Image (cartoon, helix red, strand yellow):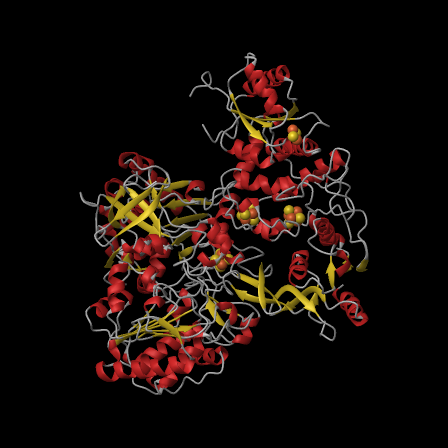
Amino acid sequence: MTEDEWEPKILVFCCNWCSYAGADLAGVARLQMPTHFRVLRVMCSGRFKPEYAFKAMEQGIDGVFVLGCHIGDCHYLEGNHRAKKRFEVLEDMMVHLGVEPGRIKIDWVSASEGVRFQAVITEFVAHIKELGPSPLGGGR
Amino acid sequence: MSEEARGVVAEVLAKGEVDGVLGLREDEGAVGPHYFRKGDDLDSLVLSPKYALPLVLRWFRLHSPDTRVGAVLRGCEERALVELSKRRQVDLEMIEVIGLACTAEEAKECGCVNGSPTNVMIGTPTEGLPERREFLALPDADDGARLDYWKAQYSKCIKCYGCKNVCPVCACEVCMMADHGWVRGGSLPPKFATFHLIKAYHMADRCIECRECEAACPVSIPLTEMYGRLLRDVERRFDYVTGADPEQRPPLLTTLMDEPILEEEEEGGG
Amino acid sequence: MEYKSVLTTCPYCGCGCNMFLQVIDGHLVGTLPSKTHEISRGSLCIKGWNSHEWVESPDRLRTPLIRGEDGELHPASWDEALDLIGSRLQAIIDDHGGDAVGLLSSARCTNEENYLMQKLARAVVGTNNIDHCARLCHASTVAGLAGTLGSGAMTNSTPDIPLADCILVTGSNTVEQHPLIGSRVILAKERGAKLIVVDPRETPLSTMADIWLHQRPGTDVAWLNAMMHVILREGLEDSEFIEARTEGFEEMRPVLDRYTPQVSEEITGIPAAELEAAARMYASADKGCILYSMGITQHTNGTDNVKSVANLALLTGNMGRKGTGVNPLRGQNNVQGACDMGALYNVFPGYQKVADEAARAKFDEAWGVTCSDVTGLTVVEMMHAAHDGKMKGMLILGENPMLSDPDINHVREALSTLDLLVVIDIFLSETAAMADIVLPAASWAEREGTFTATDRRVQRIRKAIEPVGESRPDWRIICDIAGRLGAEGFDFQSPVHIMEEVVTVTPQYGGIDYERLEEGGLQWPCPSPDHPGTPILHVDKFTRGLGLFSAVEHQEPNELPDDEYPMTLTTGRMMFHYHTGTQTRRTPALDQEVPTGYVELNPEDAKRLGVNDGQMVEVKSRRGKIHIPAEVTEKVQPGVVFIPFHFAECAANLLTNPALDPVAKIPEFKVCAVSVEPVKGGA
Ligand code: SF4
Ligand code: SF4
Ligand code: SF4
Ligand code: FES
């Protein structure tokens, strides 16, 4: 595959209660969005294990995006606190490893924020496109 | 210093508050862990090379939880106990730490910045440790050289799990490194880099930099270059120093306000 | 609470790592590598780290078992079992002579036990039918190197491998089979040593090698000869060394002349230019070290292969110095020792030949008997003899020919025709399950003794816990059997006393005693109590005087692919299991890592055959067939498949060819012809 044909492979983990509903809303409203991502549902952003990110990167995924409820709104109270902290460490780890930390990201989208979902996704996909194929590139 | 240690251990044993003292013994040309009892000849007691004694204490607790023991421990080993106690893997009440201060030379060799145990009974606390650990200079990240460096290092791995087995604070009941859901069984070297990143991530809020893992690694992968950097990040971000305070909860197990998370207890990495 | 940390030697591979078994209240709870030991240096491989896990397994044999009238094995007392063995064995000896009995000793057992087994065969049963699984791995080394150098063992030491400037690894998946030697190769490479790997299959070392040549399986003499051709053509040989230390060079030269790199390319498939580069790399190193293993030995021309490897080292003067040498990596923890102790059909302890009258006289006197001068049978030959009804009884110590020998169907038939099969083991192995009488042995963690590691390093094993159930140390059991046969000279109280006898008849071990071993291992030859041991052989002089070049010609494997069986099967091992898996498969950490066997299949072949990764396939040879999941991987070349032999449910050795090397009698495990097909309905 040449550089031009390259299309990013992106995984988006959405929590069941807010972000997944938000993504759904964006879909139902037919908001314009890039197509390079797959949404995976987790019960809570706190259920997203950093290991998913390692595994995804190992398999050549170019970007991993986690979306949860806004801080204070988590249906398991503090799951997203945990996720937030984990991501900080994860980002540091990417730096030490020599991978652009921007390839992994966490953000918040509530059930009613279809538009916000559209905005953060569009931005993330654009950023990954800018970064180019993952240097771990297991899948290429 | 061994002479001094023998005296101290003899005294502790004589007091009779512990069943025995875990230390090191030189015997049959080899040095290894040994459990000294009251009345034992202490001539064979030695202080180095250091072994992962907190690991042995974990086994003690698992198989004989009601036995109160003494242990000759260095600073890092005591800090390992602190981390283990936070995860309910040892009971600090049941262990009498006989603090052993590393010599300045030993501390230098380890690149230790954390220093002696709280209650030094053997040797004198080392002064003038460097403020910060000196890390190897990693190659530049921008052109992929850093990633290449780790690829080369981790590709030497022979999957002995020594880094996990010997680690005093690697104490999960089910290890994700050995779980096929995460890491394919049987492939050598393990595929870059989930196997190693799992361990690294799990160490970020518990590694006490004893460097036993590096000593056990048959292919000299500089494992703590990654772990140690993450520890500094955790310290900077969450003001958390591993092994310091038994009451301080690991930051990855607390809320953004440092309150305990009620929802789930730690499983796997934390 | 009782806590003990017991220093001992790893029960698995020939590296000979030392570890502390962790014992609390009489039970094994863990393992720690010894930091002060020269080989382990604080490390172990995954097998060593988990070596305590199977010891107290509920599957361990805990009482003797006797096959009843109902055809089942039933628990029995030691006296019952031993009496029965004594009377039935005696009856066979009386009726058919000692040569109707065969004994298989074990490379897993101690030196002391191997010594006793061959003594039992020679001094009590009266036969030289004694052999063990070294026949299946390095018999060709013993034969080949004894002929060329005078000593069939690793010339150098494990700790000095990293001192080499160039390491040539062939037919050895060193990282997986000898992890703590493999790790040294990795470190040497990292430090700047050159690494050449010659192997048909991708291994962890081949991927990091400076040069990786993949030959067609079974063509080693051709590329080795061609390498020497290039070395001579370019004047890279060590003429001084050849002149001063060797003989036979002129006779070999004309043969080498014919093996141009182009000739080699036709035979081996190795591109001529790559071979030339490898020859230059090895020959121009100041210190070149060769490591080889069963990829060289397990062929019908295994002995020739070994000689050829020795030729290469002699030609370049890579002998007798640190970081050089010809280093056969011996597989099992004590395969070196089992050979040293004479658990072989043709030699007494210390490689003293049975055919040699003076040697016989020496042992006649030492044992107070008259030893048979009839050459014994080897492992595979014993199976043939049993099959033909000539062998009536067998005593098998800790071996599992029902999984480890070639052509298992044949082995099964052979063993079932025996009048008496006695197996001594720690688990009910596939072989033990066929026995008339099974005796439970104490495991390595439950007894004392010595193992000899691959670099001739004699080391102690020590008892950490009491034997489980009623199991007894093998040495005890052998003494008891000898006693039941009315023999004298078996009233040993401990392995210490056995070693005291060993040293009187085994010159290489002359200076070894337990007290010295407390201070660490000793490398033989160690002829006298004040001798420090010998880390490097052949320093000023070869054991046989001069090093002998041998002219060796390429010879095709016994069974080549054809229309019916179009692919080449090569077999081997992996990091996570050991031999027939009786121990490793009962080790949770290892079983979890790799639960069953697989056949490696190149993607090209997989596509042609319509096989997906993980799909069940049938692999068939002239001797048998198995169903086994496919692993589609580029590790193997097109046309070649690889199967690890550890797994009974998909046993590679149902397929392998029992054709033998005529000198060493080693079977050709590394090459046979097979067909591969998807199993219908297999997922
Ligand atoms: S330095 Fe290594 S062995 Fe020690 S605590 Fe950290 S990870 Fe574990
Ligand atoms: S100790 Fe080293 S070789 Fe062993 S698993 Fe850890 S990193 Fe790999
Ligand atoms: S390398 Fe060999 S001797 Fe060492 S621990 Fe592994 S199996 Fe045992
Ligand atoms: S439920 Fe949405 S982040 Fe916890």
Q: Position of residue C280 (x, y in %)?
A: 37, 43
- Residue name at image x 48 percent, y 43 percent: B189
Find residue C610 and report its image quarter.
top left
Q: Is residue B116 left or right of residue C291?
A: right
Q: Position of residue C105 (x, y in %)?
A: 36, 70
Q: Position of residue C129 (x, y in %)?
A: 28, 73
Q: Quadrant of the N terminus of chain B?
A: bottom right
Q: Quadrant of the C terminus of chain B?
A: top right
Q: Nearer the viewer, residue C77 or C187?
A: C77
Q: Is residue C178 above or below residue A40?
A: below
Find residue C423 and report its image quarter.
bottom left
Q: Position of residue C295 (x, y in %)?
A: 34, 52
Q: Nearer the viewer, residue B33 or C4?
A: C4
Q: Nearer the viewer, residue C522 or B211?
A: B211
Q: Is residue C520 above or below residue B216?
A: below
Q: Is residue C306 above or below residue A127?
A: below
Q: Is residue C500 left or right of residue B206?
A: left
Q: Is residue A35 left or right of residue C251?
A: right
Asked whether residue A26 is in view, the answer is yes
Split into quadrants, the picture shows ligand 4 in the one at top right
